[in-house]
Amino acid sequence: MLRRIIYVVTPTYPRTNQLPEMTRLAQTLMLVPDIHWIVAEDSPEENPLLLNYLISTGLPYTYLKSPMPRQMNRWRVPPVGVSGRRAAIAWIRANAQTGVVYFADDDNTYDYRLFEEIRSTREVSMFPAGFVTKLQLSTPIVRDGRYEGWYDGWIFDRKYPVDMATFAFSVELLRKRPRANMAWTYSYQEESILASLGVKPEDIEFKADDCTKIWVWHTKSIKPELADRKILQPEYDGTNLRVLQEQMFIKPLPKRQEQVQVLPNIITSSSEFIQEVEMGSTEEEEEEDNFSDTSGEFAPEYQY
Ligand code: UGA
Ligand code: MN
């Protein structure tokens, strides 16, 4: 019998430590059969380093180029990860009838046993996540197998005060709720998708042995600084460093020098791409801000 597919949705963005993070996640996913990895990248350009890596893993994947609308970069707290998750939701609606959806950020740490647990999710399932807020834990409170409340450092007015890593939902439920989506917000991302899926706390399916096991950790990594330009020196011509530099994020020249100095032609297109991403573009500054924060409500369908 064909088992239900788990759609693992990973928003990601180009940065110095993107590939090590994706490597860690990919190698966990290699331990799990019957998954489909939806990698949604927050970048206006396709990222050849990431694409080549995805192909090399042999994992079944779909790559979605899903940049956050540029105007949102100027919000006080930009809704990071939302454009990727919304693009993935749209892709799943268009391509899947059954299965399970799980939002797996690229920097968290996952025990492979979690995935077998969530495969049987009928509507919405939940399980604990470690290292979230100062409580270092986000989980439903379960007594005698039944829902009793929430343990999370950020409850306030939320009806579902849990971290992104603590829940999964079925494709069937997503299809039953055609308006379900994640709102363009930083603080109410989990709230918006869970509320729009319309599940009652009493109906949540508890996984990880009735929420007694921590099988996902909200780890954070240090982002290493850009590599020194030493690697570009002519003495290394003809060596392996010319190949390795294509996989590095190299410091751009200081602005003033850039005008007078001609860039050596050893800087190839992929280094240029990397520099562009790191330095950001200035033209977007002039554009009007057409978006407003829709915290707590559901934004209209995002066209991508
Ligand atoms: C915080 C919250 O604790 C999470 O519950 C929430 O999912 C997340 O923000 C979010 O807003 O997405 P935090 O660890 O601080 O988590 O956020 P990151 O790990 O920096 O980003 C979350 C995901 O979005 C990652 O997979 C990351 O690669 C991606 N991301 C981040 C982008 O796609 N674009 C960005 O500009 C930044
Ligand atoms: Mn994170």
Image (tube, rainbow, N blue to C red):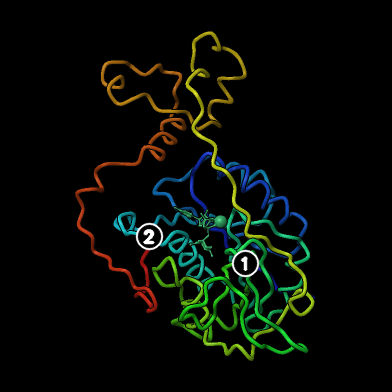
Residue neighbourhood size for the residue with mark 2, other residues' Cα within 10 Å, grouped as few (<14), some (14–19), many (≥20): few
Do tag 2 and tag 1 residues touch (Cβ < 8 Å)?
Answer: no
User: What is the number of the mark on residue 25?
Assistant: none
Q: In this view, does 19 lie above or below 122?
A: above
Residue 53 picture location, percent across and down: 61, 43
* Callout 1: SS: loop
Circle 2 sits on which residue?
Answer: 77
Residue neighbourhood size for the residue with mark 1, other residues' Cα within 10 Å, grouped as few (<14), some (14–19), many (≥20): few
Left or right: where does residue 49 sit relative to residue 114? left
The amino acid type found where label 2 is placed reads: Val
Marks 2 and 1, how far apart at CA: 23 Å
The amino acid type found where label 1 is placed reads: Leu
Q: Quadrant of the rendered structure where residue 38 is?
A: bottom right
Q: Nearer the viewer, residue 226 or 56?
A: 226
Q: Nearer the viewer, mark 2 or mark 1?
A: 1
Residue 183 picture location, percent across and down: 41, 72
Q: Nearer the viewer, residue 191 or 131?
A: 131
Q: Quadrant of the rendered structure where residue 218 is?
A: bottom right
Q: In this view, does 34 lie above or below 267?
A: below
Circle 1 sits on which residue?
Answer: 135
Look at the image and tell me in which quarter the C terminus lies: bottom left
Q: Nearer the viewer, residue 211 or 192?
A: 211
Left or right: where does residue 279 sit relative to residue 53? left
